[in-house]
Amino acid sequence: MVDTISHDVLIIGSGLAGLRAAIAAASTDKNLNIGVISKVQVMRSHSVSAEGGTAAVLYEEEGDNQESHIYDTVKGSDFLADQDVAERLVRNMPFEVYQLDHWGMPWSRRKDGRIAQRKFGGYSFPRATFAQDKVGFYEMQTLYDTCLKHNNIHFYNEWFCTSILRDTAFQGVTAIEMKTGDFVIFKAPAGIICTGGAGRIYSFSTYAFSSTPDGIDMAFRAGLAMKDMEFVQFHPTGIMPSGILITEGARGEGGYLINNKGERFMGKYAPGKMELAPRDVVSRSMIREIQEGKGFKHETGFDCLKLDLTHLGDERIKEVLAGIREIGIKFSGVDIIDEPIEVRPVCHYMMGGIHANIDGATELPGLWTAGEAACNSTHGANRLGANSTSECIVWGRITGELAAQYASVRKSKSLEISQTQIVAEQKRIYDGIFRGSGTVNPYQVRKELTDIMDEKAYVFRNEEALSSALTKVRELKVTMWKHVDDKAKEYNTNFTNVMEIDSMLRTAEVVLLGALNRRESRGAHARTDYPNRDDVNFLNHTLAYHSQDGPRMASYPITFTRYAPVERKY
């Protein structure tokens, strides 16, 4: 007999989106019982790693305005963003910044005591609201502290969710308590997936090792679409050799990118914005410099460029980039006060995710999604920096409120979950993985997968590379690697790691197939064999549905409300 835990609203994931959703749901109806399930301890959620800022229009009296933020977001997206969604983000964010402030968020301040903002790439005005260079950590701590004030929010730390339970609507999830190894059913009439992105399908990545696409894949296997997964953001400044993020705030504070000639080369590519062009533009420019022989050779053998912050002075660096200085010293042996640091474009964000509408609602009634796991298409083909933490917070609140309203109406109705689903899931993970057999090392498969993605689906792509990568990923899917050598029940990370790899392979296949099918260059998706944007054939979203024969691809229209596509120049 499988144990069952019941809640009114289930939130899977405990990052910024998940915590904001929990607060919103708990506040909407104090009689609801909210469950938050996380595969890590809450404050180890990857949202704590966000460094640079949270975008919002705060100072219209000084020249900023919301229409400018909307247009910057749409233009930055290479006109693939749903424009009504971009507008909702912008209209809601000022309230959220002040709400966090009232909850105790230690925003960095101007000398007059007002909340400070810094420049970020692709914006027409400094609107990245920051807290030194640790904005995600402070936002997480603020939201977690606020959650603990609500008696109707219950946390389940270190539980691994494996599948969505459904009939015509959401019914709950199956999960393994990592501490005991027990398989458990969580029942609820409403759910929100906030499990973050899929960035660990790449080796050179800013993501925590826990940032695997479990939640996205769970929805995919439940019949829901992944959307726009071919659009992977490569942040210009990943530290060599680890890939740890050097925040865009470093360039927002005035940092220079330089080549081996000592040149600030961005003047050739984006003279109006220089280092503060959108991330896709800067990353492509960096790779072009490297291809022209103007890079530096890192001791690992990889080519890179340098980020120079020395001219900012030690006082300013210690005030607003203290965390980055510490990262440089610890992980690269470089003190950014004294010398430039070696960087290279690094996998940082997935514009794609679970297909959702403007409210964060998925195709399954009773299930919402928010944050990087979601794709309501705030960001289209390229996200502007500081808009992701904003998206997490805005749609955390929206989905939390809507899920609570939905659950309030349906909480009195009993959920009859089909035993067939539960048995099938137990068979999949226990017979198919835990008790599986094989001679191939699953960790070697993971490394092969992530190295392939680094090599074949990086900043520049082409048909030959993507096709060979897709072939290899499909070969890896069928090799005999689905087995678990550690047979312990308690804290069996070997078991959870192999389940993560299972999700990673399916997700990588969708990324590669979407990239192959999109025969154009748009935003973060740059094809050397199709170098131009093609609005005639590809001005639409990509959907991928699960099938036994591989992903079934479809297209989905973009919502235009105010701006027609134009050539994107900076």
Image: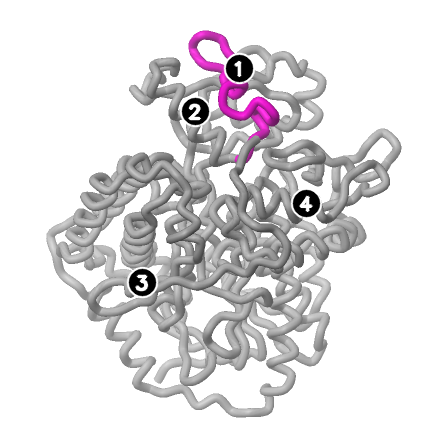
Q: Which residue is denoted by mark 2 in the rendering? A: 286
- x 46%, y 82%: residue: 169
Report x, y in % for residue 547: 26, 69
Give the mark nearer the N terminus: 2 vs 3.
2
Dot 3 amino acid type: Met
Say which amino acid is labelled 1: Arg
**In this picture, which residue range is highlighted in magenta?**
257-278
**Residue 264 vertical placement versus 555 (above, below):** above
The CA distance from mark 2 to mark 3 is 32 Å
Which mark's residue is nearer the viewer, 2 or 4?
Answer: 4
Report the residue that reaches farthest toward the right: 112
Q: Are marks 2 and 4 in contact (CB under 8 Å)?
A: no
Q: Are marks 4 and 3 in contact (CB under 8 Å)?
A: no
Q: Residue 286's x, y, as percent?
A: 43, 24
User: Which residue position is annotated with label 3?
Assistant: 553
From the image, tell me which residue sits under label 1: 264
Which of marks 4 and 2 precedes in the sequence? 4
Which quadrant of the view contains residue 209?
Answer: top left
Q: Secondary structure at mark 1?
A: loop
Q: CA distance from mark 2 to mark 1?
A: 11 Å
Counting from the top left corner in percent of width and height, residue 125 is at 71, 35
Question: Label 2 to label 4, Cα distance in Å?
Answer: 26 Å
Image: 157 above or below 318: below
From the image, which quarter does the N terminus lie in?
Answer: bottom left
Residue ID at (34%, 14%): 293
Task: Relative to 424, say whether 224 is above or below.
Answer: above
